[in-house]
Amino acid sequence: KSLCDVFYADLSHCHQTAAMLNREEAQLRSLQAATEAAVVPLAQRSATYKRRGALLAQLTPALLVPPEEVSIPPQLLEAAEPLLLTYSPHTPPLGEGAPAASATAATELDSPSKAGVLFVQSGILRQWKRCWVSAHGGALYVYRLSSSGEGTPKRDKPLAQMQLVLCSVKPVRLGTRCYLNLRSPKEQLMLQALTEETMQSWSSFFATAITAAYGVGMAYAPA
């Protein structure tokens, strides 16, 4: 009798399991078919995304170049820069009794000048250095600080040099700190002062100096 009870109990469990499977089989088969049908489109879509990713990876080096660095071809810049550096609206054209030396001297005399201690970021490591910054004659020079806190003599080689004739200046604010991003088609410098007033003074100076260096009544703005 006990054996029969166990047998009938197992038979009842199997019957209930079979009834549940018959009830859910249609839905499970439908889900299985939908899953199998989605595998092929997903594989095709994954292959498409991989091809697009490869194309974007090829374009990335070109997209990383700032617009200012590609707005003027280097060959054109090298040919035009000496002419722009010697031109001044206050001097007569060459060939009318004004030699090239006088044009250059007049440009340096007419151009504004400014000097002081600023933090400068340049080079591959992008480290900040406290330097003596001097701007005159349409150019910016960065020198090491001497032990007295003044800049080194002009005969020493500057740490960095930038012509202002084709330079653009962009103020940058990060929190409470103010920076000036100086960019030309050839090089780039970041300047930082200890006070906002000092940085505003330098920003105003660069606006005037770049206008004077360009020599046509307005500053050069790369496209």
Image: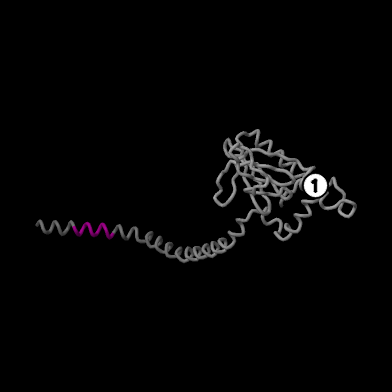
- The spot of residue 200 in percent (x, y) is 67, 36
Residue that lies at the very extreme toward the left in this rendered image: 1
Location of the N terminus by quadrant is: bottom left
Q: Residues within 10 Å of mark 1 (few under 14, many from 20)?
A: some
* Residue 92 in the figure: left or right of residue 67: right
Disc 1 on helix, strand or loop? Answer: helix
Pick whichever, 78 or 101, lies toward us. Answer: 101
In percent of the image, x 60 and y 36: which residue is there? 148
The span picked out in magenta is 10-18
* Residue 116 in the figure: left or right of residue 25: right
* Residue 174 in the figure: left or right of residue 22: right
Residue that lies at the very extreme toward the right in this rendered image: 96
- The spot of residue 173 in percent (x, y) is 61, 39
Residue 199 falls in image quadrant: top right
- The number of discs equals 1
Identity of the amino acid at label 1? Ala
Residue 24 falls in image quadrant: bottom left
**Residue holding disc 1:** 105
Pick whichever, 171 or 108, lies toward us. Answer: 108
Examine the rendered structure and indicate whether residue 33 appears above or below residue 179.
Answer: below
- The spot of residue 138 in percent (x, y) is 74, 46
- Image colouring: one colour
Q: Is residue 11 highlighted in magenta?
A: yes
In percent of the image, x 37 and y 60: which residue is there? 28
Examine the rendered structure and indicate whether residue 59 appears above or below residue 101.
Answer: below
- The spot of residue 221 in percent (x, y) is 73, 49
Q: Is the magenta stretch mostly helix, strand or loop?
A: helix
